[in-house]
């Protein structure tokens, strides 16, 4: 005979499967669309200059609305916000799949970002409030962290398969399958709860925070397309910084802040958010420049490129689950996150040794494995620590900060590393005479290795700063637990 506690236990793990599926859909969406871009451009006939907007439209909507999306889940109940996010993301994906013009595809991508900003924080906050017993929480966050860390690599492989054997449109249609299964599971497994006293939404904070984040993301995206000295780039970045400064001031003065500052001022949570953001900047170099290198220099097909990243995916899964279940309860997040950042730096430094005729097995694979082990050590403990000990009514916005740091980090990484790589490539070609194919290939690789050096430096700085911020030892909430295991809220 099955006891009620056994039933509750089994439901919690089914909830984890649904939340993990939703997280995978959101994470892989970035790289799966990157793989589809060349085919979509040929089909719809838009220019190289316009191509960036397929990525930017999603990033702008997603990055600027995450804090609002997280708070909406706190206010109105996470089950229905989660379901609405899934359904809306599916509809937006379908619109993108049937798009007959560039404008329609951009609009669909922006709509994906809007619903993604509801979906992502709701998924993580549901995980936070579902798994409260320390041992189960560690296992659940290990799995969730592995998905968060490896989803981009999975997107490369899935995007290559769908684009090569079906059509670029299936890189969007595939979200209908993910979302459909997740919606059915959420309706069956999740229960909705709302706060007894619903606080008012912080309208001034919502406006300054969302528009400030929009300014930052747009400024970094615009810098990648134009330059750091471009007037629009400067105006967007300055406006973003000013509005976010105003947002911080407002959060200290309003009765019901959008982002209570106690969430980010805690040393463990602040260090975890910073580790996620800085890693997002540095990791960008792996997927963008290494993808170019594998396809353009080593001649890999899209599918072979996706397969080439699988060892890193397996390494992430291994280290994320092992660190979260075996190591975190014994040593706490500080040595794990610090070690992961150091491994990230080592892997990036190893990649600086590539040349136009290097082999995958000797010059790429070892770095992917080392970095995969590092990424698992960073993401699973950092995501867990960033949401550990948060009041249940703040779980949504604390979870939104995780996704916000990932998004802002990715935007900075896109602009910063792309600019550095392009400048290094241009400088290499100067004074070399007529650019032959071999010279162009060598110059491109020089640009990639420059980006890898900078990524290594960012990882190294992050290792020092985050290790200093994170408290030594196991957090009290990790040892004691936040209460009895609960069903999803």
Image (spheres, rainbow, N blue to C red):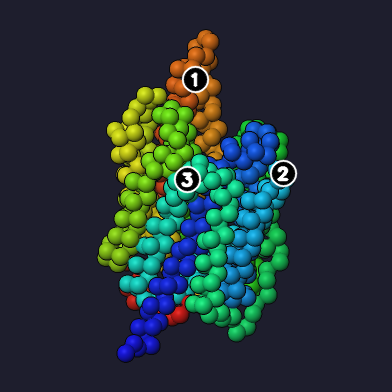
For numbered disc 1, what is the local secondary structure? helix
Q: Earlier in the sequence, mark 2 or mark 3?
A: 2
| Element type at mark 2 | loop
Q: Is residue 213 left or right of residue 470?
A: right
**Whether residue 401 can be seen here:** no
Given residues 34 and 134, the one toward you in this image is 34
In the image, which is nearer the foreground, mark 2 or mark 1? Answer: 2
Residue 26: percent from left, percent from top: 53, 56
The quadrant where residue 80 appears: bottom right
Residues under numbered marks 2 and 1 in contact, where contact means CB atoms less than 8 Å apart? no
Say which residue label 1 marks: 440
Compared with 122, 49 (above or below) is above
Mark 3 crowd level (few <14, some 14–19, many ≥20, 10 Å Cα): many
The N terminus is located in which quarter?
bottom left
Q: Position of residue 479 (x, y in %)?
A: 32, 73
Which residue is farthest top? 433
Using a 10 Å C-alpha cutoff, classify the residue at mark 2 as few (fewer than 14 neighbours), some (14 to 19) or many (20 or more): some
Which residue in the protein does label 2 denote?
101
The disc placed on residue 161 is 3
Q: Residue at x 62, y 55 (%)?
A: 93
391 relative position to 378: left or right: right
| Residue at the spot 35% in from the left edge and 88% down from the top edge | 3
Q: For mark 3, give the secondary structure.
A: helix
Observer-nearest residue: 213 or 287? 287
User: Is tag 2's residue or tag 1's residue first in the polypeptide sequence?
Assistant: 2
Question: Residue lying farthest front?
Answer: 165
């Amino acid at each position: 005979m099955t006891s009620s506690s056994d039933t509750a236990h089994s439901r919690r793990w089914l909830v984890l499967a649904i939340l993990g599926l939703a997280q995978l859909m959101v994470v892989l969406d970035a790289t799966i669309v990157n793989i589809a871009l060349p085919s979509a451009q040929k089909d719809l006939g838009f220019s190289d200059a316009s191509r960036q907007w397929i990525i930017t439209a999603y990033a702008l909507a997603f990055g600027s609305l995450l804090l609002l999306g997280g708070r909406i889940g706190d206010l109105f109940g996470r089950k229905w916000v989660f379901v609405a996010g899934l359904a809306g993301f599916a509809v937006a994906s379908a619109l993108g799949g049937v798009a007959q013009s560039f404008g329609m595809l951009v609009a669909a991508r922006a709509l994906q970002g809007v619903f993604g900003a509801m979906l992502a924080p709701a998924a993580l906050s549901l995980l936070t409030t579902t798994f409260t017993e320390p041992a189960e929480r560690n296992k659940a966050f290990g799995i969730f962290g592995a998905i968060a860390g490896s989803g981009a690599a999975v997107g490369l492989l899935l995007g290559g398969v769908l684009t090569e054997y079906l059509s670029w449109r299936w890189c969007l249609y595939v979200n209908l399958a993910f979302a459909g299964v997740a919606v059915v599971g959420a309706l069956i497994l999740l229960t909705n709860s709302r706060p007894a006293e619903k606080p008012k939404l912080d309208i001034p904070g919502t406006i300054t925070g969302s528009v400030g984040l929009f300014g930052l993301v747009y400024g970094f995206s615009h810098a990648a397309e134009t330059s750091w000295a471009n007037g629009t780039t400067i105006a967007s970045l300055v406006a973003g910084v000013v509005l976010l400064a105003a947002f911080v001031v407002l959060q200290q003065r309003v009765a019901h802040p959008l982002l209570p500052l106690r969430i980010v001022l805690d040393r463990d949570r602040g260090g975890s958010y910073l580790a996620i953001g800085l890693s997002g900047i540095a990791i960008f170099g792996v997927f963008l420049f290494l993808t170019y290198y594998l396809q353009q220099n080593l001649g890999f097909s899209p599918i072979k490129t996706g397969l080439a990243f699988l060892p890193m995916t397996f390494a992430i899964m291994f280290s994320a689950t092992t660190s979260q279940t075996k190591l975190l309860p014994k040593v706490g997040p500080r040595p794990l996150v610090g070690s992961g950042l150091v491994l990230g730096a080592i892997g990036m430094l190893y990649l600086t040794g590539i040349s136009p005729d290097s082999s995958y097995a000797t010059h790429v694979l070892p770095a992917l494995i080392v970095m995969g082990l590092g990424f698992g050590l960073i993401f699973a403990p950092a995501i867990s620590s960033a949401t550990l000990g948060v009041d249940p009514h703040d779980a949504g916005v604390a979870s939104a900060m995780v996704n916000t740091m990932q998004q802002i980090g990715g935007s900075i990484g896109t602009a910063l590393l792309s600019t550095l790589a392009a400048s290094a490539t241009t400088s290499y070609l100067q004074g070399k005479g007529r650019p032959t194919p071999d010279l162009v290939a060598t110059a491109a690789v020089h640009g990639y290795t420059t980006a890898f050096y900078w990524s290594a430096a960012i990882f190294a700085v992050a290792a020092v700063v985050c290790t200093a911020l994170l408290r030594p030892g196991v957090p009290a909430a990790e040892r004691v637990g936040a209460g009895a295991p609960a069903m999803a809220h």
